[in-house]
Image (cartoon, rainbow, N blue to C red):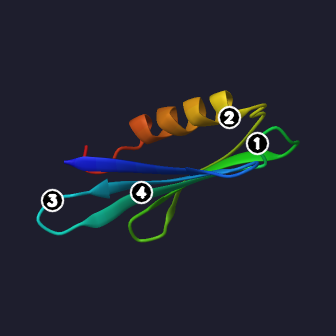
Amino acid sequence: MRILTINTGSSSVRAALWDAGPTERRDTTAHVDRIGLPGSRLRLTDADGATVLDQPGNLTGFDAALHALLAALQRHRPGD
C-alpha cells in the first residue's frame, strides 16, 4: 500500500509518497516552490535523495501546481 502526504504553504507544496509495507519507507519526495510567482519549480527526489526530476514551470496557482505534482508522481512511480 502507498500513502501520499501533502502539505501546502503560502507559495509551495511539499509531498511525500510512502510505501507502507512491512517496513515504512518514503519512496519519493516532491517540492513545488514559488507557486504563482516567476521561477516556479517542481522537484522530485527518490528514497536515496537523488534528483529524479527538476522542472521549471509557470505554475500560476495551486490547481496547476497540484496537477503538475500528481502527473510527475504518476510518471515517476518507484517500483514500476
* Crowding near the residue tagged with mark 4, few <14, some 14–19, many ≥20 C-alpha atoms within 10 Å: many
Quadrant (top left, top right, bottom left, bottom right) of the C terminus: top left
Q: Nearer the viewer, mark 3 or mark 4?
A: 3
The Cα atoms of the two marked residues, 1 and 3, are separated by 33 Å
The local secondary structure at tag 4 comes to: strand
The residue lying at 72 percent from left, 47 percent from top is: 41
The structure residue drawn at horizontal position 69% and vertical position 50%, both measured from the top left corner, is 12
The amino acid type found where label 2 is placed reads: Phe
Q: Quadrant of residue 66?
A: top right
Q: Is residue 65 above or below residue 25?
A: above
Q: Secondary structure at mark 1?
A: loop
Q: In the image, what residue occupies the spot 41% across and 71% down? A: 48
Q: Tags 1 and 3 in contact by the CB under 8 Å rule? A: no
Badge 2 element = helix
Residue 58, x across and y down, in percent: 78, 33
Q: Is residue 73 left or right of residue 78?
A: right
Nearer to us in this view, 52 or 28: 28
In the figure, is residue 30 to the left or right of 13? left
- Give the mark toward the camera: 4 or 2: 2
Disc number placed over residue 62 in the picture, else none:
2
Give the residue pinned by disc 3: 21
Relative to 73, 78 lies left or right: left
Q: Which numbered dot is residue 28? A: 4
Say if mark 2 contacts mark 1, CB within 8 Å.
yes
Q: What is the CA distance from the residue labelled 2 to the residue labelled 1?
A: 7 Å
